[in-house]
Image (spheres, rainbow, N blue to C red):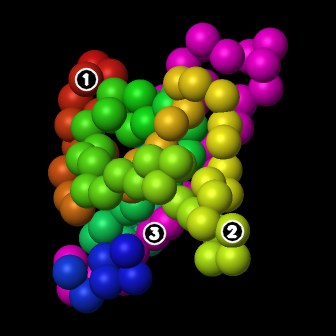
């Protein structure tokens, strides 16, 4: 994953955390946060936007806004160096970390604006 910048040849904007308070979920806030973050990255000139989805719910949001998954690491395969045991064992449905990118955030923002009309 360290080669993502070299792979795309650009400076990227990395979205690291997405949280929506439990009593405000299912209201479109997560999608809005991702879309607005992508729009801000596009306005700042970033050509690639990346999101590491450690939650199955964040992964669904990334897919919903059209980001493409480029990497997946099941948590059961992420082992400690000393113990060779899984480092993380989150409850289902959170079984892996998925890396999503949008390599045309400016175009995605234009599409988002068209669908708002």
Instruction: Give the number of the mark in front: 3 or 1.
Output: 3
Lateral position of residue 95 relative to residue 49, left or right: right
Q: Which residue is drawn at 21% across and 58% down?
A: 104
Which quarter of the rendering shows the N terminus?
A: bottom left
Number of other residues with Cα within 10 Å of mark 1, as a class: few under 14, some 14 to 19, many 20 or more: few
CB of mark 2 within 8 Å of CB of mark 1? no
12 sits left or right of 36 in the view: left
In this rendered view, identify the residue nearer to me: 10 or 56: 56
Residue placed most toward the observer, 6 or 65:
6
The residue carrying mark 1 is: 115
Q: Is residue 4 left or right of residue 95?
A: left
> Is 58 a magenta residue?
no
Q: Which element is circle 1 on? A: helix
Could you say whether the residue bearing mark 2 is in a helix, strand or loop?
A: loop
Res 13 label? 3
The answer to which image quadrant residue 70 occupies is bottom left
Label 3 packing within 10 angstroms: few (<14), some (14-19), many (20+)? many
Residue at left offset 47%, top offset 55%: 77
Quarter of the view holding residue 102: bottom left
**Location of residue 66 in the rendering, given as x and y in whole percent from the top left corner:** 26, 37
- Proximity of marks 3 and 1: CB atoms separated by less than 8 Å: no
| Residue 54 drawn above or below residue 20 | below
Q: Distance between the residues labelled 2 and 1?
A: 50 Å
x 67%, y 37%: residue: 90
Q: Which of marks 3 and 2 is in front?
A: 2
Q: What stretch is highlighted in magenta?
A: 8-34
What residue do we see at 60% from left, 66% from top?
84
What is the x, y in percent for residue 2? 40, 82
Residue 68 visible in this rendered orientation of the protein:
yes
Q: Name the residue under label 2.
A: 83
């Amino acid at each position: 994953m360290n080669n993502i910048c070299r792979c795309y040849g650009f400076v990227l904007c990395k979205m690291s955390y997405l949280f929506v308070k439990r009593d405000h979920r299912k209201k479109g806030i997560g999608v809005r946060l991702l879309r607005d973050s992508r729009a801000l990255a596009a306005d700042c000139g970033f050509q690639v936007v990346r999101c590491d989805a450690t939650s199955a719910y964040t992964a669904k949001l990334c897919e919903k806004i059209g980001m493409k998954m480029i990497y997946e690491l099941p948590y059961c395969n992420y082992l400690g160096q000393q113990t060779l045991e899984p480092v993380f064992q989150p409850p289902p449905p959170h079984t892996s970390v998925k890396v999503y990118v949008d390599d045309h955030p400016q175009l995605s923002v234009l599409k988002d604006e068209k669908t708002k009309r």
